[in-house]
């Protein structure tokens, strides 16, 4: 009998990194370990003077990587039939766009003495919104000079993305910008690190990061052209040649595990490491994303990921953040949409307003379950962290409407859940309008696992059955699947990513079915949500609410200076 | 030396009743006592099935009256020179419009066995909003058939007022309506009770209640005509002859203390009792209201009261709840405006959302004091209990706008205070537009006494100095002033109410001056508030926010049925 074969999936999240060791035949996770980042607040380094700043230290990545892989291996060694030699591939996903400035060797500037105390030399975490002004300027420049660039990323370039951050760095920390030979996405850095060669020219960059966050597309031969980037700043134009020419999907090998890292981790050198990708996209793969199936990863924020068959025609969906060839499944358009805050909104309410903890989440969920749709008279907008999809505007904020003197916590909590459900439906409706109908929803992520009320509301609001991914660690499982794919069909048994998905993923028995009694009321409430939402649309702004929300932010900025 | 002369002011609030014994020469309060009502929640009896219902039991009024007057007298007896014989007059104020159904003898139905468990036989407390539908219908009927009726009460008849409540009673409890010989305002009932004759035909009704809440005006010979009232319902038309023909200002004697009540209270029979009035109006008198001076009574709700000289022309101010000849000071137009919830909004936030207590109010006030205007990026509407003045619409609700994931409690608390300041400014600006300029603001009420942050924000937002009434019990002091006025110039030394005010009222040394640094930002924020506010104006409703807020209430009602 042949020895059992396994792959390792390594998933770098916002607060921690997880390794899972997965059986290649069944997708069974035989061992797993999580390491929390140690620096900042749960790994996020903030700037008291600017609430939009969110950074991370690459040393947390290094330490976490070694910690979780060695611990998962130690656990796996107690499984009969497991041996380190049975590991045939490694996949890696990370948050993104989380770029970091590096030197010629690809070493992060943050690890160098000269920059060790410089917050701008750290990794610029996905949810860093300090580059809002630059994002607006990039959107304006591209709208005027390169509208096709924006068509792939929803019509608006985000403050969360690669070039906004690099440009903002040039503005706030020119010394860091000058010292940076290149900038590398977190998801490109880790596979290169494992393969023992982080030199920027040698790194195989992820098409997921490149296409969704850096306006990369084969239609225009890669990254935005140097002439366009020089419109941002001549120095950004010059940087282009030190970035990359080509990006790859994750069925491609980024490199082979180096002897140095094999020893650190307790693995055999030479194992293929897949080109990296973003956690949400890998999560979708691990949850069984397919044409007609959207995977909702519900966490602090959400990602809605689906794929569409390539028809020969270019696919553009206004307001949908990213449509990238091969970014999710090789051979399909990968479509990424999402909400900038979901769990974060509930956490904000519980932590900041109620000053409660996890127990209060449970209590409010239980109380909110007893309420009927529409009963509270409340309506909320889910924009406490801006709007990522459809409106694509980080400078939006939250709204709560309808409160009386009797309004209680549970009612607000439910209204916030409903707001996120309405936000999700707005995204799915937009996809369907542009020829990407959604037939099936598979949810994953901590909140999907834990909060039956939220899942039921999502089913009621969407009018669709909602399935739960079998694995609770879909991102890491997705990484393990790509580990199996890059191992090749002889080692890993699979010719395609779809074949690997079919064998290694599944859904749970629990399915949330829409309640017909709730449909009419939610139809009405969604109509109201949509009315408010649309008053923030790009055309017109006839509604004073848009104006008020924006001017409040102007005033806030003005008095903070 | 002549014996010292005193009057008793009795002030029936929402949760308690207070008696003060006041030196007629100086206004000094030599004794005071408060009794909380015992029934319901702090005296307010609610209906779990309908959050708009708020009632009170007349037995609480009787018990509280005896309790506080006898206790205040007991305290006064320890003051040198005091004797019960020195008390020369009694004044009474109450909440309103708080009508109650009574029999031929004027006995409240709630005190009768047959109706003792019937919530609709109780006193219908001012803040009972269950009669919204009737208010809208009265507004529509009067707009069509008797527009001059509405001109005196802001253009819209409120669900808080006399005829809305009576009509709603006919709808929800026809048995109570049928059993009621008449309906009597709380402020008319107590003086009649003290005078020993509550028969409806004998009660001297307050022009304050009649004019502000029951569309009474001498221009059209009293209450609305029977033909109009019959348009509501023929039975309301028939009721008119069992209500009253004439109403009086509070310099008129309602009656003389009966032997029975003199004995109950420990007083001498035959003391004159002034015609009653509403707490807010009496509070204004006790705080020194005059032409150009507005008195703001800041409590759970606020009243803004001022007076305007009679010019011969009829004074109408759209959206201002009441303009009534003699309702505040005899010989002037009394003008009443106000916000349906102020302290109630802060209490709602602290109690319902933060689940805190008085200590948390202090803590949040202290934290909010450290914030700069505009710094939070928040804006709120102060309509958790509807809008009483300018929009005159109980079917409005609260709104909070601009929250992020960092928004904290203190920021929300400050935004709520600011919202109430903006609401107040909107009222003062409207008065000035219609020829009633405000030169001086005198504040009173518990919040004005206790919350320096709120007072400073009010000064900053209004751009005017804000004075504090010397007496913390201005309502009761106002009642005592009318007690002195009805005692007559021989007994009480004063020819007019103004003379009595001049001697018996004053302001404190503490004055809140507007901070010039805050003015520009508050100017901008108020502009935004006004923009939202005006999108709810009676003309147009071009803004979707109006539509959304109203339809939410429709849905709420629909799912609650």
Image (tube, coloured by chain):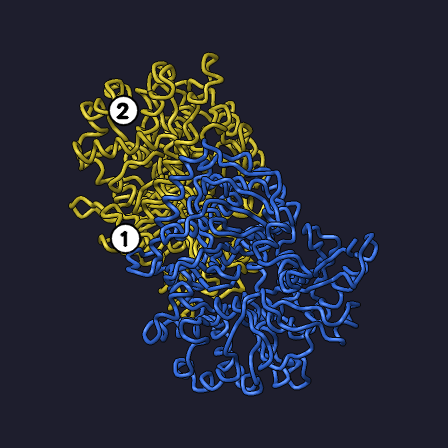
Chain colours: A blue, B yellow
Q: Same chain for marks 1 and 2?
A: yes
Quarter-of-image position of residue B558: top left
Residue B236: % across, % down: 27, 21
Quarter-of-image position of residue B258: top left
User: Which is nearer the eye, B544 or A233?
Assistant: A233
Q: Residue at x 50, y 82 (%)?
A: A170
Residue B327: % across, % down: 30, 39
| Chain of residue at mark 2 | B
- Which disc number belongs to residue A374? none
Q: Residue at x 56, y 79 (%)?
A: A183
- Which disc number belongs to residue B244? 2
Q: Between marks 1 and 2, how big is the CA–CA gap?
A: 33 Å
User: Which is nearer the eye, B80 or B392?
Assistant: B392
Are the residues flagged by discs 1 and 2 in contact, CB closer than 8 Å? no
Q: Residues within 10 Å of mark 2 (few under 14, many from 20)?
A: many
Residue B120: % across, % down: 42, 22
Residue identifier under label 1: B430
Q: Residues within 10 Å of mark 1 (few under 14, many from 20)?
A: some
Could you tell which of marks 1 and 2 lies nearer the N-terminus?
A: 2
Q: Is residue A520 visible?
A: yes
Q: Is residue B356 visible?
A: no
What is the secondary structure assignment of the residue under circle 2? Answer: loop
């Amino acid at each position: 009998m042949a020895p059992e074969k396994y792959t390792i999936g390594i998933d770098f999240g916002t607060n921690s990194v997880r390794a899972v060791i997965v059986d290649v035949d069944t997708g069974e996770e035989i061992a797993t370990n999580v390491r929390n980042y140690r620096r900042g607040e749960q790994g996020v380094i903030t700037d008291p003077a600017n609430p939009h700043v969110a950074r991370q230290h690459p040393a947390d990545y290094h330490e976490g990587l070694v910690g979780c892989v060695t611990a998962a291996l130690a656990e796996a060694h107690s499984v009969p039939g497991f041996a380190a030699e049975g590991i045939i591939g490694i996949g890696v996903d990370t948050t993104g766009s989380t770029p970091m400035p590096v030197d010629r060797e690809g070493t992060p500037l943050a690890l160098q003495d000269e920059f060790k105390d410089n917050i701008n030399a750290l990794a610029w975490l996905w949810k860093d919104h300090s580059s809002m002004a630059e994002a607006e300027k990039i959107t304006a420049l591209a709208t005027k000079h390169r509208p096709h660039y924006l068509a792939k990323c929803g019509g608006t370039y985000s403050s969360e993305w690669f070039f906004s951050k690099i440009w903002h760095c040039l503005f706030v920390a020119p010394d860091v910008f000058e010292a940076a030979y290149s900038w590398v996405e977190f998801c490109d850095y880790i596979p290169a690190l494992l393969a023992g060669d982080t030199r920027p020219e040698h790194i195989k960059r992820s098409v997921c990061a490149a296409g969704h966050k850096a306006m990369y597309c084969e239609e225009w031969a890669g990254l935005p052209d140097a002439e366009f980037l020089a419109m941002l700043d001549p120095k950004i134009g010059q940087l282009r040649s030190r970035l990359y020419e080509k990006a790859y999907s994750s069925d491609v090998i980024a490199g082979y595990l180096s002897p140095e890292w094999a020893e650190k981790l307790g693995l055999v050198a030479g194992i293929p490491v897949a080109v990296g990708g973003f956690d949400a996209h890998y999560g979708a793969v691990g949850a069984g994303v397919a044409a007609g199936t959207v995977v909702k990863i519900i966490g602090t924020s959400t990602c809605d990921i689906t794929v569409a068959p390539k028809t020969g025609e270019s696919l553009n969906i206004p307001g949908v953040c990213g449509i990238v060839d091969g970014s999710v499944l090789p051979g399909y358009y990968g479509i990424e949409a999402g909400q900038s805050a979901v769990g974060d909104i509930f956490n904000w309410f519980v932590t900041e307003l109620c000053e409660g903890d996890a127990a209060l989440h449970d209590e409010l969920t239980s109380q909110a379950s007893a309420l009927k749709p529409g009963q509270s008279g409340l309506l909320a907008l889910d924009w406490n962290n801006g709007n990522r999809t459809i409106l694509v505007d980080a400078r939006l904020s939250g709204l709560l409407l309808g409160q009386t003197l009797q309004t209680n916590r549970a009612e607000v909590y439910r209204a916030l859940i409903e707001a996120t459900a309405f936000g999700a439906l707005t995204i799915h409706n937009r996809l369907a309008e542009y020829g990407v109908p959604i037939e099936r929803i598979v949810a994953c992520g901590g909140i999907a696992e834990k909060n039956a009320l939220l899942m039921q509301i999502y089913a009621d609001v969407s009018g669709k059955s909602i399935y739960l991914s079998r694995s609770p660690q879909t991102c890491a499982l997705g990484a393990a699947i790509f580990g199996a794919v890059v191992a090749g069909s002889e080692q890993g048994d699979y010719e395609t990513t779809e074949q690997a998905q079919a064998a290694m993923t599944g859904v749970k028995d629990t399915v949330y079915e829409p309640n017909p009694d709730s449909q009419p009321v939610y139809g009405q409430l969604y109509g109201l949500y949509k009315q408010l939402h649309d008053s923030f649309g790009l055309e017109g702004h006839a509604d004073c609410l848009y104006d008020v929300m924006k001017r409040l932010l102007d005033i806030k900025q003005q008095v903070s200076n």
